[in-house]
Image (spheres, helix red, strand yellow):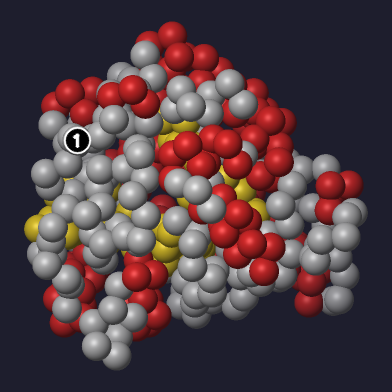
Amino acid sequence: MRGPLCRLTQVVDITRAASSLREKALARALQGQDPGPEPGSRNPEHRMDPSPPRPPRLPHSGPSNVGKLAWYLGRAVRCHLGGQRIPLTSTLILTDHCNLHCRHCSVAHLGHSPNRFEDVQRDLRSLWDTGARMLVITGGEPFVWRDGPHDLEDVIRFGRALGFFRIVVCTNGTFPLESSADFLWVSLDGLSEEHTALRGEGVYDLVQSHLDQTIHPGIFVNLVVSPLNLDQLEASVEAILDLHAVRGILFHLFTPYLGSDPALALDAPARQRAVQALLRIKGRHPRAVSNSVAGLRALAHGRWGPRPLWSGVVINQGQQTPCCCRAGIADAQTCAACGCSPAAETWAIQTLRPSAILDYLKFL
């Protein structure tokens, strides 16, 4: 038990330090003072441009950050000392319909019947019952979902009513970025040429216009690394992080889901090259890059697991699966070549890697 106990001690030290920093910043804000940059944040000079200022965080109902830290620490104890298996994150597949046909995507347009709101409510209750308190809503494209008078906002409100600590929506960015979700993760796979090659003509400009117009305080970017954008990766990231609305970025390596384009797969040397570039970017932008060092290293060597992981759970029309994949889109070969960062990050947190825990605290 020495290993788990040692790491749990590290968790306690990290959460205490993070809580202290947050409380000091809050006290300064309540006194009308500038709370100052977060530790490890980007050079504030890049904010000195004509772009509108980033809006402040909106108040969030539910447990305080201290309450959440206490809950997560209790979860760690129950899982590592009590043998329980409580997922860290839960994912709702709201729809498989999408308004795009992206070259690298094989998780949309699968022919599922439309989700009814009562079925969505059932699925959300099932996710809540697993013990997970982070909810991710994805598709397809969540913003296209409708059931009579019900839309995505009704789903978010129901998740809030159940008590999920944080709610995330993953979107392709082609709809206005207006939502009561805590975070909107917007797909942006590089600059115009790279994004267009993957997602089609006109999509890049539309996404950029919505990023320019949004006042949502929780905008992050999802970027999938493939041979199409690897050469321009570091330049693309600098441009993305200069967008006034973008708080951070999460990198994924292309995962060869069943039916996907094999030409987009990264061979072993390209995978190593990609991760080395991502580690350099992480070093320059430690707060803006949501991947942890432990998670990136796991993606490089691929020896994390065993997979599928119990620390994540997905539900699609009543069918619940562990890890990060809905049923029917992956096999053993897919898992062996997994580049899904949420899976790697939950593994790193599940195994109490301090860098992963520290990065996860940003989303309390």
**How many numbered tags mark residues here?**
1
Residue at the extreme top of the image, as rendered? 269
Above or below, comparing residue 160 to residue 131 in the picture:
below
Above or below, comparing residue 1 to residue 153 in the picture:
above
Image quarter of residue 231: top right
Residue 97: x percent and y percent? 26, 62
Viewed as shown, does residue 100 lie left or right of 18? left
Q: Which residue is mark 1?
A: 259
Residue 174: x percent and y percent? 49, 62
Identify which residue is drawn at 13% across, 31% down.
Answer: 331
Q: Quadrant of the N terminus?
A: top left
Residue 260: x percent and y percent? 25, 34
Return the residue nearer the eye: 144 or 167. Answer: 144
Check disc 1: other Cα within 10 Å, few if <14, some if 14-19, many if 20+: few
* Residue 23 visible in the snapshot: no
Return the residue nearer the eye: 310 or 280. Answer: 280
Above or below, comparing residue 40 to residue 160 in the picture:
above
Viewed as shown, does residue 300 lie left or right of 261? right
Residue at the extreme bottom of the image, as rendered? 149
* Residue 233 visible in the snapshot: yes
Identify which residue is drawn at 23% across, 59% down.
Answer: 96
Identify which residue is drawn at 31% across, 19% down.
Answer: 303
Question: Could you tell me the amino acid type at mark 1?
Answer: Gly
Return the residue nearer the eye: 329 or 288. Answer: 329
Is label 1 in a helix, a strand or a loop? loop
Residue at the extreme front of the image, as rendered? 201
Residue 291: x percent and y percent? 51, 38
Identify which residue is drawn at 83% across, 57% down.
Answer: 36
Return the residue nearer the eye: 87 or 241. Answer: 241
